[in-house]
Amino acid sequence: MSDTTFDLTPPTEEQMTHLIAGLDEQERRVLLEHGTEAPFCGTFLNEKREGVFTCRLCGLPLFGGGTKFESGTGWPSFTAPFADGHLSYIRDTSYGMVRTEIVCARCGAHQGHVFDDGPPPTGQRYCINSVSLAFTPKGEPLPDRLGRGEPEGMAVGDRPGA
Ligand SMILES: [Zn+2]
C-alpha cells in the first residue's frame, strides 16, 4: 500500500556504489551498518523550519518538517512518515530488546526506530539519526539523486498534491 507519487524503484547497483562513495565514515556506520549516532549532537536536532527531511543516501522524502517534535531524547523525532510506503519496518531484537527498526523503503538505508509512545495525533515516535537525513527548506528544490525527475527536483511546496 502506498499513496506516494515518488518512484520507489530501488537504486541500481551502480547508483548505490556512487551514493555510498559520497558518505563519510560516520554516515556509513549509521546508514549501512545500522549504527546509532550519539544523542544531542545531531545536526537536525534543532531544525524547526518548514520543509522536508529526505534520505541522506537516495534523496527520498521521509518526514515532513511539520511532524517533527521535541522528544527530549537527543535525536530528531517525528510523529508520522512523509508518505505511506516511504519507510520499511523491520523487527529488531538486538541488545535484548524488541524494537521496530525503520529503513528507507527505496534504498534500505538505516534511519532509526519507531516507538508507540509518541504524542498525538499518531501516538508514534519516529526516532531518527540526523546523519540518516538531509533537509530541504520549503521553497527549495528537492534532491533528485537518482535522476528520477518529477516530483524529485521540484521545489518543496510546489509538488502536485503537496
Ligand atoms: Zn533512501
Image (cartoon, rainbow, N blue to C red):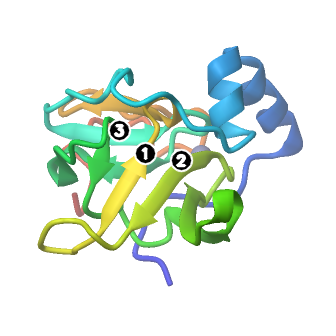
**Marks 1/2: CA distance?**
5 Å
The amino acid type, in three-letter code, at marker 2 is Gln
For the point 18% across and 34% down, the residue is: 138
Task: Kindly identify which residue carries mark 1.
Answer: 128
| Numbered label tally | 3
Q: Earlier in the sequence, mark 1 or mark 2?
A: 2
Q: Would you place residue 90 above or below residue 56 in this image?
A: below
For the point 12% across and 71% down, the residue is: 120
Q: Secondary structure at mark 2?
A: strand
Visible residue check, residue 82: no
Q: Quadrant of the C terminus?
A: bottom left
**Marks 3/2: CA distance?**
11 Å
Determine whether label 1 and label 3 are within 8 Å by CB: yes
Residue nearest the observer in this picture, 63 or 3? 63
Residue nearest the observer in this picture, 132 or 6? 132
Crowding near the residue tagged with mark 2, few <14, some 14–19, many ≥20 C-alpha atoms within 10 Å: many
Q: Quadrant of residue 22?
A: top right
Q: Earlier in the sequence, mark 3 or mark 2?
A: 3
Task: Kindly identify which residue carries mark 3.
Answer: 75
Determine whether label 1 and label 2 are within 8 Å by CB: yes
For the point 60% across and 39% down, the residue is: 58
The amino acid type, in three-letter code, at marker 3 is Trp
The amino acid type, in three-letter code, at marker 1 is Ile
**Marks 1/3: CA distance?**
6 Å
Residue 111's tag is: 2
